């Protein structure tokens, strides 16, 4: 056989193509095998991760519950006690319940000595020029100037509108002297001192109000009851509207007039007789 002729009849390009195709076929088979291996490994890894997640989902709540029971036991609640989170929720729920509003205690009237003892006190009319008028629940005056505190005390009432009086009502409670605990009021044609407020502490001689000149009803000073805007004479049963019409001087009004006189001020006038002593303790 002539081998030279055989080689000459074989197409070198065809032979090269066949060899290349054979190599690529082997490469595809190897690649397919490697890809299958990677897929198997990926599935195994995914399955392992899923098993871990399932285990975690099951064990974490169990561990949390065990921790809550242990904490409750350590705090003395025992294994049957509510876990801290439940107790906290219950506490918040209890806090959220509306609280009952504290009841405001009404001011109560009590008897005062109404002593005529000037020690430690100052004439409330020392900074005013006044003309004394009748004694009723308190003492009426007309004039100009300022009214000062008789003694040390604290402002307990200040009403410039709707006071029940024909004008303003200012009251303070004495904290010193023979009449400590008793209240004093200045009413009708007066203007409160600048900045005066309920709760303010005042000292003897401190300005409380300014008299309004030529006010139709003048002004009235007297012992207060410490109940609303009522005078002591009214609450003590010493005065009523008929007494007012008849210009009857109440016992509390006479006491306050006598104290002003003892302090160097002008006393009031008894125009229609005098009332007796206290007859009732009900407002």
Image (spheres, grey):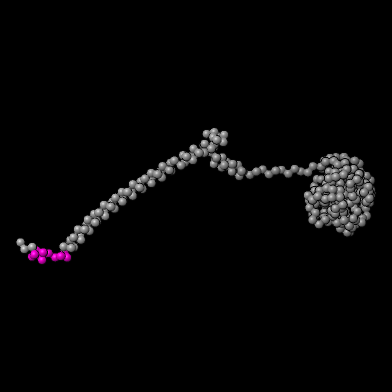
Say above or below: 4 vs 206: below
Predominant SS of the magenta segment:
helix
32 magenta-colored? no
Q: Can residue 223 be seen in this view?
A: yes
State the residue in front, 110 or 58.
Answer: 58
Identify the residue at image location x=86%, y=46%.
223
Residue 140 screen position, x and y as percent: 90, 52
Identify the residue at image location x=54%, y=33%.
78
Q: In this view, does 36 lie to the left or right of 111?
A: left
Identify the residue at image location x=22%, y=56%.
26
Say above or below: 63 vs 264: above
State the residue in front, 45 or 251.
Answer: 45
State the residue in front, 134 or 90.
Answer: 90
* Total marks placed: 0
Residue 133 screen position, x and y as percent: 92, 52
Identify the residue at image location x=36%, y=45%.
48
5 magenta-colored? yes
Residue 171 screen position, x and y as percent: 82, 49
Query: What range of the chain is rendered magenta?
Result: 4-14
The quarter of the picture where residue 281 lies is top right
Say above or below: 26 vs 4: above
The quarter of the picture where residue 146 lies is bottom right
Q: Is residue 14 left or right of residue 124?
A: left
Residue 100 screen position, x and y as percent: 67, 43
Q: Can residue 215 be seen in this view?
A: no
- Quadrant of the drawing holding the C terminus: top right
- Quadrant of the drawing holding the N terminus: bottom left
């Amino acid at each position: 056989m002539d081998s030279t002729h055989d080689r000459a009849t074989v197409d070198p390009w065809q032979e090269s193509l066949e060899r290349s195709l054979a190599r690529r076929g082997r490469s595809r088979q190897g690649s397919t095998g490697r890809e299958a291996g990677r897929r198997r490994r990926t599935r195994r890894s995914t399955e392992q991760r899923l098993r871990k997640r399932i285990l975690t989902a099951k064990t974490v709540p169990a561990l949390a519950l065990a921790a809550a029971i242990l904490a409750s036991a350590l705090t003395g609640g025992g294994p049957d006690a509510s876990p801290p989170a439940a107790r906290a929720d219950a506490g918040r729920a209890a806090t959220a319940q509306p609280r009952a509003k504290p009841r405001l205690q009404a001011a109560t009237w009590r008897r005062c000595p109404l002593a005529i003892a000037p020690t430690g006190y100052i004439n409330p009319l020392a900074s005013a020029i006044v003309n004394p008028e009748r004694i009723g629940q308190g003492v009426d005056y007309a004039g100009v100037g300022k009214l000062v505190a008789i003694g040390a005390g604290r402002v307990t009432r200040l009403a410039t509108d709707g006071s029940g009086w024909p004008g303003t009502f200012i009251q303070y409670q004495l904290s010193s002297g023979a009449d400590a605990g008793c209240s004093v009021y200045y009413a009708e044609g007066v203007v409160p001192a600048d900045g005066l407020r309920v709760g303010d502490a005042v000292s003897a001689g401190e300005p409380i109000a300014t008299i309004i000149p030529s006010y139709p009803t003048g002004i009235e000073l007297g012992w207060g009851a410490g109940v609303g805007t009522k005078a002591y004479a009214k609450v003590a049963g010493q005065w009523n509207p008929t007494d007012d019409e008849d210009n009857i001087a109440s016992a509390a009004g006479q006491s306050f007039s006598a104290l002003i006189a003892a302090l160097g001020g002008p006393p009031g006038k008894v125009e229609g007789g005098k009332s007796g002593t206290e007859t009732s303790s009900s407002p």
